[in-house]
Image: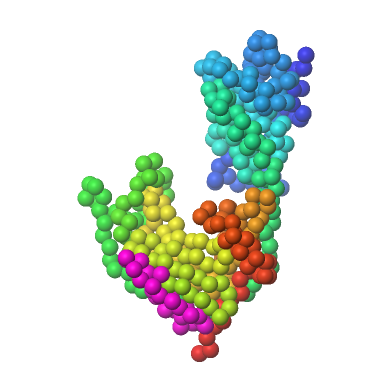
């Protein structure tokens, strides 16, 4: 009969320290990743009392799920539940060797792409046998997700960025009109500073008040288009209907850009698959103002003509897209699935288009000679 410490193929350690956004490690002092943790002895004893071999459970996540199904006493007994959670987390680390433990403050096992709260997993195993097959399918796809993530990370580390070509005269934002909005209690809302660095209330994530505060973005979009038309060799088509203004900018070289403005937001499309929105999120929790949304809009719209847009698609077996935006001050990158509304033929057209670019970088628009 195997001792508990011998059930898993590695050293059993204590839990790692809690992960904190404010944590700091001196160079070379990064904590050792923990694959298997202690504290599962009570569950091992329970399994043996129930006539099950813990060694078989420790090597097979599907078998563990079958064993736990319907055993409500496991989650009704706090100490046993905690022990079962540690055992289940170790089994996850056996099934996916790249996964390690983290405290966030929940106990989780995962990688950079996926992380599983183990106490919640045990409850699902006990109460929801119908989730077993989808979970096993997720486990089967996890290695590929990690591989795709490494490929995306490698693209983000690519240092062969182009030199941006900005006009000599910088863009100046038009003066936005003063706006004053009040909450249900009659208090003035200071958008952009509502939470003073604290956490917004939970209900604000699903609440959108005063979306009309973003109406000045239409002015900003108009001014941006006029600035680009005066600075670059670009053909501009303007269409207006039903409170919406759409600008299509077709440069002599580089990525075509479409800017669609309403009284509540501005949408930007460029290149093959690039999409951006200002505001990025209009909910009360995110607390964007017209000025913060305009900051984002201007960063995007000014970076693309300067040659700061990179698109790589498809990446990995999941066929995700990788986007980099190189701005006058700093850079950013993102990755994920392309717009789900795009058809297969549109995606293949994007592949063909991007194949002709240098590592995915769209060339800068041609500056006008003043």
Q: Residue at x 67, y 27 (%)?
A: 61
Side of 189 relative to 171 (left or right): left
From this viewpoint, which residue is outermost toward the left?
186
22 is within the stretch colored magenta: no
Q: Residue at x 42, y 79 (%)?
A: 226
Q: Quadrant of residue 325?
A: bottom right
x, y percentage for residue 279? 41, 59
x, y percentage for residue 199? 42, 44
Q: Quadrant of residue 262?
A: bottom left
Q: Residue at x 50, y 80 (%)?
A: 234
Side of 87 relative to 5 (left or right): left
- Taking depth in this image into account, of 44 and 105 the one nearest to the observer is 44
From the viewer's perspective, is residue 325 above or below residue 60?
below
From this viewpoint, which residue is outermost toward the front?
345
**Residue segment shown in magenta:** 221-246
- Taking depth in this image into account, of 22 and 7 the one nearest to the observer is 7
Please state, as top left, top right, bottom left or bottom right, where the N terminus lies in the image.
top right
From the viewer's perspective, is residue 207 above or below residue 230?
above
From the viewer's perspective, is residue 86 above or below residue 241?
above
């Amino acid at each position: 009969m195997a001792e508990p410490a011998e059930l898993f193929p590695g050293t059993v350690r204590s839990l790692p320290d809690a992960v904190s956004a404010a944590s700091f490690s001196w160079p070379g002092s990064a904590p050792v990743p923990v694959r298997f943790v202690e504290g599962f002895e009570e569950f091992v004893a329970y399994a043996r009392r129930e006539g099950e071999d813990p060694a078989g459970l420790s090597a097979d996540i599907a078998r563990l799920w079958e064993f736990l199904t319907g055993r409500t006493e496991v989650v009704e007994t706090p100490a046993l539940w905690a022990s079962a959670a540690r055992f289940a987390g170790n089994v996850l680390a056996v099934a996916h060797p790249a996964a390690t433990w983290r405290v966030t403050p929940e106990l989780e096992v995962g990688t950079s792409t996926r992380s599983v709260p183990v106490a919640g997993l045990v409850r699902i195993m006990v109460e929801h046998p119908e989730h077993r097959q989808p979970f096993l399918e997720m486990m089967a796809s996890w290695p590929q997700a990690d591989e795709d993530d490494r490929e995306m990370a490698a693209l983000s580390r690519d240092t062969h960025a182009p030199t941006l070509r900005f006009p000599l005269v910088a863009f100046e934002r038009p003066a936005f009109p003063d706006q004053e909005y009040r909450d249900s209690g009659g208090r003035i809302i200071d958008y952009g500073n509502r939470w003073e660095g604290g956490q917004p209330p939970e209900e604000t994530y699903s609440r959108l008040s005063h979306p009309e505060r973003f109406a000045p973005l239409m002015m900003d979009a108009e001014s941006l288009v006029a600035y680009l038309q005066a600075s670059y060799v670009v053909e501009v088509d303007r269409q207006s209907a039903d409170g919406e203004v759409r600008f299509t900018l077709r440069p002599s070289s580089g990525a075509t850009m479409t800017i669609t403005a309403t009284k509540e937001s501005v949408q930007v499309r460029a290149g093959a698959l690039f999409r951006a929105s200002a505001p990025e999120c209009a909910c009360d929790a995110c607390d964007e103002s017209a000025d913060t949304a305009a900051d984002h809009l201007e960063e995007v719209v000014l970076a693309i003509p300067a040659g700061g847009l990179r698109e790589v698609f498809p990446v990995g077996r999941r066929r995700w897209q990788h986007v980099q935006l190189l701005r006058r001050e700093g850079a950013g990158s993102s990755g994920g699935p392309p717009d789900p509304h795009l058809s297969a033929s549109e995606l293949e057209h994007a592949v063909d288009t991007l194949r002709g670019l240098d590592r995915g970088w769209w060339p800068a628009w041609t500056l006008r000679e003043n």
